[in-house]
Image (cartoon, grey):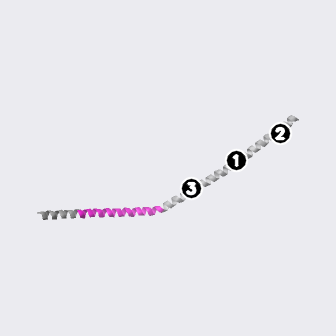
Amino acid sequence: MTIELTLLISGLGLAFAVYSGLANMRRNQSADDRNAASQLTTVIVKLEHISAGINEIKAEMPGVKADIKEDREKIIRIEEMAKQAHTRIDTLEKNRSLREGESSE
């Protein structure tokens, strides 16, 4: 009788231990699932913010390209004006040296 009672208590203890272990595993698994879902949501939100930033940059690009094109055209005009100015300066210097040569004779 004592062996049967001991075996019964041992069996109940073992069954309770198995049940507790399985319950803890399920609870831990659901907690892990919630944590994973939370982290995934955080990543998705961050990706949406990055996407919004990229869209803003894309929206600004045509304006930037137009500004660069305008600046390039201005630089070309300035370089042409500088060439013309150098040509006029060279002509003035030649005329001045010709005049100085005539007046010294």
Tell me which residue sits at (71%, 48%) in the image.
Answer: 27
Q: Which quadrant of the figure contains the C terminus? A: bottom left
Tell me which residue sits at (39%, 64%) in the image.
Answer: 70
Q: Say which element carries label 3.
A: helix
Span of residues in magenta: 60-89
Q: Give the number of marks.
A: 3
Q: CA distance from mark 2 to mark 3?
A: 56 Å
Assess disc 2: are there few (<14), some (14-19) or many (≥20) residues with their C-alpha within 10 Å of its C-alpha: few
Tell me which residue sits at (49%, 60%) in the image.
Answer: 57
Instruction: Please give the label number shown on residue 28.
Output: 1
Which residue was labeled with disc 3? Answer: 47
Q: Say which element carries label 1.
A: helix
Q: Amino acid at mark 2?
A: Ile
Precedes in sequence: disc 3 or disc 1:
1
Residue 80, position in %: x, y? 30, 63
Give the camera-side residue of 96 and 56. 96
Which residue was labeled with disc 2? Answer: 9
Residue 61, position in %: x, y? 46, 61
Q: Amino acid at mark 3?
A: Leu
Precedes in sequence: disc 2 or disc 1:
2
Q: Amino acid at mark 1?
A: Asn
Position of 9 relative to 51 (above/below): above
Q: Which quadrant of the figure contains the N terminus? A: top right
Assess disc 1: are there few (<14), some (14-19) or many (≥20) residues with their C-alpha within 10 Å of its C-alpha: few
Q: Is residue 58 magenta?
A: no
Residue 18 sits in which quadrant?
A: top right
In the orientation shown, which residue stands out farthest toward the top? 3
In the orientation shown, which residue stands out farthest toward the front? 104
Q: Is residue 74 magenta?
A: yes
Position of 57 relative to 10 (above/below): below
